[in-house]
Every structure is written in structure tokens, then in C-alpha cells.
Image: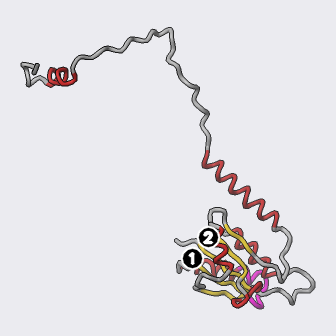
Amino acid sequence: MFPEDDEDPAALFRWAIGEVTPLPEQSPSIPAQQRPRPKPRARMAEQDEALARGEFARLLQSALPVEGGDVLSYRRDSLPNRTLQRLRKGQYSVQDELDLHGASAAQGERLLRQFLIEAHAHDYGCVRIIHGKGLQADGGAPVLKNLVDRLLRLRADVLAFHSAPANQGGTGAVLVLLARQ
């Protein structure tokens, strides 16, 4: 039956929901069953730590200096392996180039850092760095090639790099994929 007082919202509500059965009251002596809550974890900090450990391990593995004919190769874990394969084959368009021939280690580092800053400012995706094979070195490892290898691995804006295909400089140059802004 429709309530006689249709202006009273509470009466309309009781009429609309019908008859209800009250819940039994719980006694205070019996606690509600609860599972123990898990201890909070800093999951993002754990992921960051694992990523840092991975980068550190990679740097330790590559602690030996590279030789003139060695292939340079690196990719961030977040980057698909297919992207590195395309870079290795030279399938990305090179948007700028830096030639470090004849530079000292200090000059090479300064030039490389400045070049990467400018490439990032121009929002370039792929650049080529010509470091040479270091065959002129007095029996030691190629200085500029090792400098480029170490410096690129430590930069946050470098996603991947690989020695260029033979027609683009071979092991005397490296193609670098940069993170976009």
C-alpha cells in the first residue's frame, strides 16, 4: 500500500524498500575475524634498487677496456631487444653526427657532453658519434672509444647504442638512441 503521507521522504523510503530484517548484533567479547594485514613495502624503491644493481653489474662486467675492433653495444632493460637489433642494422635515420678524431680525452669528453646536450635540446632521436678505432694508441686501449662507451652508459638520456654498420663507420663509430623530451 502506498503511504498516506507522500510528503514524508522517510515514509516513502520505508514503503519502497519493504520489510527488513535487522542484523544480529555482535557481542564485544567475540572479535570480528580479521586477517593480519601485510607489512607495507616500498615497491617502487625496491624496483629502483634492482635497476641500479643491474646497471652497476653491467658496468662491472664491462670494466675491461674495449679494443679497437670490439663492438660497442648497450640497451636499457626497459627497451625492447628488437629496437637494439634495428639500431645495429642502421635502420634509424641519423639526425646529427660528432667526429672526435684527433681530440684528447678531456676534449673528447667535453665535446661529447656538449653534443648530447644539443642533440637533446633539438629532440634528436638518433645520432652518430665517430670515435675511431684507436689504432694510433701506443699499445694501449683506444682512449676515445672507451671514453664514449663509459660516458654513454652513464647518461640517463641514452636509451641504447651500438657500433655502426660497416657502411656507417663500423667499430670506429657508434649509433646512439636518445630519449625524447
Residues packed near mark 2 inside 10 Å, few (<14), some (14 to 19) or many (20 plus): some
Work out whether mark 2 precedes mark 1 in sequence or the reverse, and give the earlier one: 1
The residue identified by callout 2 is 157
Amino acid type, callout 1:
His
The quadrant the N terminus occupies is top left
CB atoms of marks 2 and 1 within 8 Å: yes
Amino acid type, callout 2:
Asp
The span shown in magenta is 100-109
Residue 41, compared with residue 13, is above or below; it is below
- Indicate yes or no whether the magenta region holds residue 107: yes
Considering depth in this image, is 138 or 177 the residue closer to the camera?
Answer: 177
x, y percentage for residue 5?
A: 7, 20
Residue at 60% over, 74% down: 178
The residue identified by callout 1 is 120
- Indicate yes or no whether the magenta region holds residue 42: no
Considering depth in this image, is 170 or 120 the residue closer to the camera?
Answer: 170
Residue at 53% over, 22% down: 34
**Quarter holding residue 161:** bottom right
- Mark 2 to mark 1 CA distance (whole Å): 8 Å
Q: Residue furthest left?
A: 4
What SS does tag 2 mark?
A: loop
x, y percentage for residue 153?
A: 71, 70
**Quarter holding residue 114:** bottom right
